[in-house]
Image: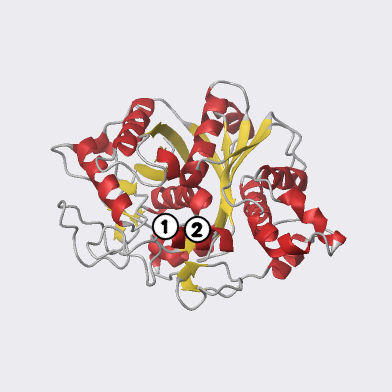
Amino acid sequence: MTKGVSITGMGIISSIGNSVEENYISLIENRIGISRITNISTVHADVIKVGEIKKTNEELVAELNLTEDNNFSRTAMIATLAAKQAVENAGITSINQFRTGLISATSVGGMDMTERHYYDYFKHPELVKYIACHDGGDVAEKIAEELGLKGMVTTISTACSSAANSIMLGARLIKTGKLDRVIVGGADGLAKFTINGFKTLMILSDDFNKPFDNERKGLNLGEAAAYLVLESDEIVAKENKKVLARVSGYGNANDAFHQTASSENGDGAYLAMKKAFEVSGLKPSQIDYINVHGTATPNNDLSEGRALLRIYQDEKVPDFSSTKPFTGHTLAAAAAIEAVYSVLAIQNNVVYPNLNFENPMEEFDLQPQITAKNKNIEHVLSNSFGFGGNCSTLIFSKNA
């Protein structure tokens, strides 16, 4: 097996916890973060459920010790919190000691501030500062500034596979010797823009989402941020670093089928998984747990399920579950928070439950793990698929 790069630090904030430890406790104790909307004034507040971080923007500003004249979006604030956690967890005291980069993923960017102040820019000049934070790239710039990072900084926005591609690019940069250390991950805050957009697509559920259930009605949107520190084997050896897990495989593909739907046969998902296995040198039978994309939309679960059956053919599909019933679908952050969950699954030898599942889908005989299960876990496969056919797969492995 080709050795992947090392994961030496993780940070996360989501609707089920403000730290890695809090998120893990929620996952094993079935503490869900899906609730009614409280931080956004919207006509949909009493109609839909979301995975909302129960911190106001004012509380986030105070936690980050930002000045009153700051122009941080909500996405940038939760991203900075998670990235700082990851750097601290990795024991990094000198951020520029090695060739260090930052690859941050987002799809919402500063949209929450744009929609809040759009009509007031001409009447209130003091609000013009928020125009600059609209761009998705501003989130990465804010993180780098807060960390004091002087190296490569870039942004990836490939819809709901964004953070997976961030992790993949970071791993490739280390493997090819371009960088020694990369902070990778993603963040998206909730905004009316996404709430209204997904409602228009008619794929939001008015109840708790039910991935891979025959009666699934759609997804719950969520907000979150998560970042991981990837480091080369050379730095790990030189610094005697503790390795949490390894990025052993990755792949991405595009099924070029539809702007917002996956192909019915899961072509993109199949190809992404196939490539990840080729990179890792692992066989599908060596995967102990699959963290499926599992958005609970009729299209995604059917497409992903068929792709899994194509990959495994006559073999039994390993234990799998979606963690989105806990957090909601956090868009560009999804692959990052699920990367953290995948590493925690490896560290604690646990398969998380696929909550709310009752009835198997009529199209195939696939049933997710519905209760927490303890077993030895060496390798976890994590899928993330986005609009525009963007399909990405990551494989995480226990440190040898």
Quadrant of residue 200 in the image? bottom left
Q: Is residue 33 above or below residue 81?
A: below
**Image marks 1 and 2: residues in contact by CB distance under 8 Å:** yes
Quadrant of residue 81 in the image? bottom right
Camera-nearest residue between 319 and 309: 309
Camera-nearest residue between 200 and 359: 200
- Where is mark 1, residue-wise? 201
Quadrant of residue 209 in the image? bottom left
Q: Is residue 75 above or below residue 182?
A: below
* Amino acid type, label 2: Gly
- Where is mark 2, residue-wise? 197
Q: The residue tagged with tag 1: helix, strand or loop?
A: loop
Q: Is residue 27 above or below residue 42?
A: above
Tell me the distance, in whole angstroms, between the alpha carbons under discs 1 and 2.
6 Å
Q: Is residue 12 above or below residue 388?
A: below
Q: Is residue 17 left or right of residue 154?
A: left
Location of residue 361 in the rendering, given as x and y in whole percent from the top left corner: 19, 58
Q: Which mark is residue 286?
A: none
Please give the count of numbered marks on the rendered protein.
Answer: 2
Location of residue 28 in the rendering, given as x and y in whole percent from the top left corner: 39, 65
Task: Name the quarter where the N terminus is drawn.
Answer: top left
Task: Name the quarter where the C terminus is drawn.
Answer: top left
Q: Is residue 298 visible?
A: yes
Q: Is residue 171 left or right of residue 55?
A: left
* Amino acid type, label 1: Leu
Q: Is residue 366 left or right of residue 229?
A: left
Location of residue 26 in the rendering, given as x and y in whole percent from the top left corner: 45, 67
Location of residue 188 in the rendering, given as x and y in whole percent from the top left corner: 57, 54
Q: The residue tagged with tag 2: helix, strand or loop?
A: helix
| Residue at the image position 73 percent from the left and 50 percent from the top | 133
Q: Is residue 263 left or right of residue 87?
A: left
| Residue at the image position 59 percent from the left and 21 percent from the top | 177
